[in-house]
Image (spheres, rainbow, N blue to C red):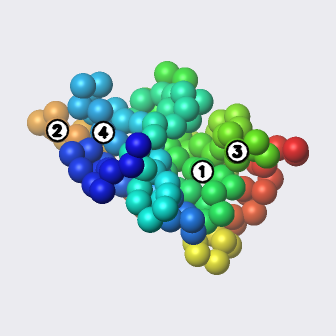
Amino acid sequence: MKSHEPFQDIPIVGFSISSKATYYFYVLDFDNGGSGHISYSRLIDGEYENPQKMSKAINTGKYIAHPFIAPDESYLIWDAEKDGKNTPDIYISFRQKDGSWGTVINMGDKINTPLYEQHARVTPDGKYLFFWKGDVKTREDGSRYVIGSPYWVDAKIIKTLRPQQ
């Protein structure tokens, strides 16, 4: 089913777009404490299809957010809180030959630490993976704030994580 305004009334917070003009975005779920999920919408015959929620493999954990889709849609990177951790890590999944998404892979200790890692993006030239790393601090009055900085690694890490097919 297609719509002229498929994104109307959807609490989309951030998105990434592929070279095929497919949008990958995260949607806040106010009924689930502000946690979210990743959906996509393809451009078909000049119109965007209604958003499609990605599989449970991708949408596992809490605060699933900040998708980055490779321009050729060969991989998807995002962050989420998983495995009982209260801080997000960055994950990747590779598109399989049949078009499905492969096993979710934690991007490892060159990126993920006990701190918050979020907002991964690969530079347009494909050479670097930038992400944000920070920590939550608590003021004397009990309010919380986040401090952090951008970090980067060589994007070759993506190739090292790709399973052999």
Residue 99, which numbered label? 3
Secondary structure at numbered mark 1? strand
Quarter where residue 140 is shown: top left
Outermost residue toward the top in this view:
84
Q: Name the residue that disc number 2 marks.
A: 143
Tell me the CA gap for discs 2 and 1.
34 Å
Q: Are marks 1 and 4 in contact (CB under 8 Å)?
A: no
Residue sitting at x 55%, y 32%? 55
| Mark toward the start of the polypeptide (2 vs 3) | 3
The percent position of residue 120, horizontal first and vertical second, equals: 52, 57
Residue sitting at x 56%, y 57%? 69
Q: Is residue 6 visible?
A: yes
Secondary structure at numbered mark 3? loop
Q: Are marks 2 and 4 in contact (CB under 8 Å)?
A: no
Amino acid type at image mark 1: Leu
Answer few, some or many: residues within 10 Å of disc 2's Cα (few below 14, many 20 plus, some between 14 and 19). few
Answer few, some or many: residues within 10 Å of disc 1's Cα (few below 14, many 20 plus, some between 14 and 19). many
Residue sitting at x 33%, y 51%? 3
Foreground mark, 2 or 1, reads 1
